[in-house]
Image: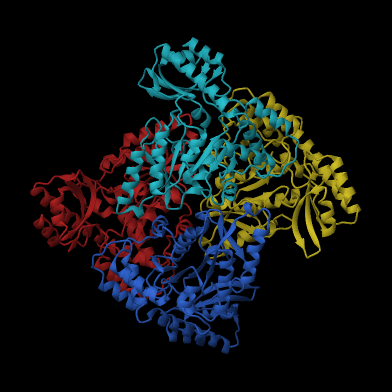
Chain colours: A cyan, B yellow, C red, D blue
Amino acid sequence: MFHFDTDYMEGAHPAVMQRLVETNMEQTPGYGTDHYCDKARGLIRQACGDETLDVYFLVGGTQTNSTIIDALLSHHEGVVAAETGHINVHESGAIESFGHKVLTLPSHAGKVDAHELAQFISDFYADETYEHMVAPGMLYISYPTEYGTIYSKQELQQLKSVCQKAQIPFFIDGARLGYGLSCDAADLTLSELTSLCDVLYIGGTKVGALFGECVVAHPGQLKHFTPLVKQHGALLAKGRLLGIQFEVLFTDNLYFRIARHAVEQAMLLKQGFISKGYQPFIDSPTNQQFFTLPNEVMDRLAQHHTFEMWGKRGDTHTTVRFVTSWATKREQVEALIADL
Amino acid sequence: MFHFDTDYMEGAHPAVMQRLVETNMEQTPGYGTDHYCDKARGLIRQACGDETLDVYFLVGGTQTNSTIIDALLSHHEGVVAAETGHINVHESGAIESFGHKVLTLPSHAGKVDAHELAQFISDFYADETYEHMVAPGMLYISYPTEYGTIYSKQELQQLKSVCQKAQIPFFIDGARLGYGLSCDAADLTLSELTSLCDVLYIGGTKVGALFGECVVAHPGQLKHFTPLVKQHGALLAKGRLLGIQFEVLFTDNLYFRIARHAVEQAMLLKQGFISKGYQPFIDSPTNQQFFTLPNEVMDRLAQHHTFEMWGKRGDTHTTVRFVTSWATKREQVEALIADL
Amino acid sequence: MFHFDTDYMEGAHPAVMQRLVETNMEQTPGYGTDHYCDKARGLIRQACGDETLDVYFLVGGTQTNSTIIDALLSHHEGVVAAETGHINVHESGAIESFGHKVLTLPSHAGKVDAHELAQFISDFYADETYEHMVAPGMLYISYPTEYGTIYSKQELQQLKSVCQKAQIPFFIDGARLGYGLSCDAADLTLSELTSLCDVLYIGGTKVGALFGECVVAHPGQLKHFTPLVKQHGALLAKGRLLGIQFEVLFTDNLYFRIARHAVEQAMLLKQGFISKGYQPFIDSPTNQQFFTLPNEVMDRLAQHHTFEMWGKRGDTHTTVRFVTSWATKREQVEALIADL
Amino acid sequence: MFHFDTDYMEGAHPAVMQRLVETNMEQTPGYGTDHYCDKARGLIRQACGDETLDVYFLVGGTQTNSTIIDALLSHHEGVVAAETGHINVHESGAIESFGHKVLTLPSHAGKVDAHELAQFISDFYADETYEHMVAPGMLYISYPTEYGTIYSKQELQQLKSVCQKAQIPFFIDGARLGYGLSCDAADLTLSELTSLCDVLYIGGTKVGALFGECVVAHPGQLKHFTPLVKQHGALLAKGRLLGIQFEVLFTDNLYFRIARHAVEQAMLLKQGFISKGYQPFIDSPTNQQFFTLPNEVMDRLAQHHTFEMWGKRGDTHTTVRFVTSWATKREQVEALIADL
């Protein structure tokens, strides 16, 4: 049985694992104050092309989103996101549990539109009762999105421009960042992406790490962040585990090389489906692929492969999600296509 | 340089690490729904002597305390704890960030007294304005305490009795549980301890795991706990990492064997200091030892060893904490004593 | 200049004011424990036709919604409401500030549909990842709605039935309750309305009181409510002021008599607009009336009357809201129509 | 039966009540945007001797404390207060419900000591683990305190100096401000008091208003305060009711004249007790007086007067609180003394 359910079904990339084993018995101080974290912070700054960046390591995606958003918002503000955004749908109310409303914009295959954002903000302040409403206090997007799609450089520039005009920070959830930046459709680098936002997190859990997310912030954006991370229960005691992993992932470009591998398997899978006559439900260039299948085809595939139901299409068809990862083997994809 | 600062300076016990490596490339479903977690839950129930227990795995101590306390309290209630309790001092306001007040009792070498607890509750309800005050909604203790001390079975029975009479849950923070239960002064088993409280967490981070805490709850205590764990950002995507670690730790009694080793090193250290004429600041039977040293002695030791300042005693002396762990070697302790 | 902006532009009904003056120098205990509150609670129970009801008095609408919703929801739950619901739009994030998400359903002229609610709940539990999502924990509706519309008895029975099946409480925000129950289209009594929901609040601020909202709850619904009201800052020191006002309003049916007066003026206004050729934007049977006017007509009216802009319709027209109250005089409405 | 339980047992001062009646049928816009509030804000600025002050009106004390503290603190900060402070004891956890910890200092007859505050802050930052602790983010005191005592000008200057050095705001809860500033022991004016703190609230509920508290803040201290007040449920719809009351209270010095009356009655009461051989439990110069009485004396007084128990002193004595107000008559006090 091969699994295409999601991209966090294996442990860590073997190089990461090996380094954790090699360093296992060393004694270091806790909470990210060790030399591995220092080294990793340096490598991340280098990869992001900016020596002034603040870099923090947290454990998982939900806590990273919740802590960053809590740090960026004032009490009277909410976070603007696509209605399909992870923070609005799949985080069990983590954002609200810290007192913040998620203000939703329409989703365009997972993406928000800069014009709609601008209109939303402008309508807000045009409303005479705006002090009785939750103010748009920051923008949240995911790159790639929950639908595997990515923003173009121009779209990001437009979003940035709207945020700057409204003087609100622009935060990018990069839980699957590697898979986005390494796909053929990506038209910008990590360095360019960093320069276009105020805060970004580089996902490790889904891209080669055992666990861990790396927060990158322009100076002054995340004030008093360490006590806030602790308060959110997101400060790992053995913080060096995060530093070690990101050091490995950002040495010799490993992070993007393994992400590229996953994307290549996803493209193979996509072409396989297309060649058998299926059109993508969403045209995703990254490691998540969506197809609407007749139920009998889906059931047949399910005998040897697992994947996620994404929604019924009437009584006869179902949209299904297939996800590849850094660990997916070409043979697994070929077997899936063969079974189609 | 040898480090006695704390018990989370190394990675994981080699047996834990080895198992993580062996299972690394396996694909499993996420969030603790895998077979490793199932197996570990079974082993934990066995070790706790109760097949009906609910068992959950979280990542770190602060998030575990914060999530459990949030689950147990109603809005109008607070958590009663020693004023020295970890939740009152060293969690950056995590408990309050979810809306709950910490109600403090005096600390007796880190412990709360059952009579003082009973009096506190009785005074509360005797106050005519009690509806304007935060109600005592649960009891929090740590075993062992932040001072390395432990409660006797009788003391725990008395606390349990007060809690039962007041109909409030009794929660034990066992971040260092192994070091408590495996010391000579301990007069009860894990099974007995479990039966004396409503919710307990068995600390992994400080006792052999890379990270991870195991929550054990009597049925019905932690309602709708999984979404709450997710909301608190404490639900690990690759949940199997926690299951694997606890499976190893609770196979062949490894958890208590390695904890016992740490305690033996601590006793060696303690006897060493006593034999050189120093009396313990607190009489701790576990892996944390406290001594008040002349500053010149402290400075001399600091040339080859690290440890934590616990408080100045006038201008000439300082109380210092030494912590051993499952990884502490006998030679390290002997070198420390030799340097004394 | 006559004002039709909203229904809280005057002070209190003269009979309420007079009673406040008469009782002014009396000394009573605080926080609603006085004999006026007791008497008012009895009158409210009588009006609601159920002697077992719990009755509480709070000061304003937002705090009443926020306190009730906080009392009814568990941490992992959210409140289901129409996307136009007051709690979702005009309470500055009060619900979220206490940790709860507002889960929105489509608005049908301000109302939610029972079938859509049932589908929402059923879809939620059908989703395999529902533990990562905010559970529908209660239903919030307003009667009348923010658009002046009201639910029929049958619609309320259907909503109640869905809530019962899902085992979630059904809460009705009656900030303008009097204007709803006293209109011609209303097909149920206060007593019937009470029996169809779990918690209800009877609005005083907008219907004759100086301020004050009366919460009516079936037994067991609002546990430990008094400390929660205090925590939310909603427990008035001189609680008797609320009791006195509701005693007057619920003596000799004053509450519904003055509400009926407001509705009659609104109907006069509505007929006046229709007779001059304008069709209502929303067909409201209560004290809020909505018309789309050519901008030059709107500007002309604005010379002698005030009202609220409700939204632009292109460059030439605007939808406008006119609100009558217990204090609106027939001559004011006639003057408005004459100026049309 | 005469009541000395507290100072909010009557309604409003007759002049306040009369003005509410006179203005009752006027139509004004809501939420404090009316001309009465404007006028009152001007009078308050004048009384405080500073035209640059921001002035807001809220309804009650708990909501005022909770909203101001929420506005002043960052997420990682707590509010420093005497352990007897109202916010720490009698607000049902309102401060914590918005995520903030109350950090307590010893109470000296209700007051905090500037040296202890300075030490607390200095100890905090000297602790290596301070990022794991809740930072002292502001100072809260009450003037007069919960024990009727007042700070001297010098004590306030010292507190201000500590706060300035630590760069934290200094907030004064003036729920009973009038009774403090108008007593013989007061050595500063409202204007001087205002200049010594960053935010202050002038209590109306206990000093002549029906309800209402007036927040006075130096520019820039309370950012985005209106939406926060709304979020906390503390924005009164008919805001003009607050403006009208404070206009009356701050016209012709009424506020301080009626407060002075209460203090004079309290001094009469105090002298009466002293003349009969009782010494004050706390030497309060304001409208709250505390005496320890033999239980049989207490019981005898209780036949014709009500007052609050403040704590048992063994089996034979009880400390009792007597409170006068703007409404207390000299004959009531004389009757009490006569019954002694």
Residue at 79% over, 41% down: B182
Q: Nearer the viewer, residue A337 or C146?
A: A337
Establish if C2 lies above or below A9. Answer: below
On the rendered structure, is A293 left or right of A174? Answer: left
Q: Quadrant of residue A89?
A: top left
Residue at 31% over, 45% down: C84
Q: Nearer the viewer, residue B47 or A293?
A: A293
- Residue D108 in view: yes
Give the position of the N terminus of chain A as an image quadrant: top right
Q: Nearer the viewer, residue D84 or B241?
A: B241
Report the label total: 0
- Residue D304 in view: no
Where is residue D143? Give x, y as percent. 51, 73
Where is residue D269? Give x, y as percent. 51, 84
On the rendered structure, is A86 left or right of B29? Answer: left
Where is residue C129? Give x, y as percent. 48, 31
- Outermost top residue: A338
Where is residue C34? Give x, y as percent. 41, 67
Establish if C272 lies above or below A209. Answer: below
Q: Nearer the viewer, residue A168 or D134?
A: A168
- Outermost bottom residue: D275
Residue at 15% over, 55% down: C299
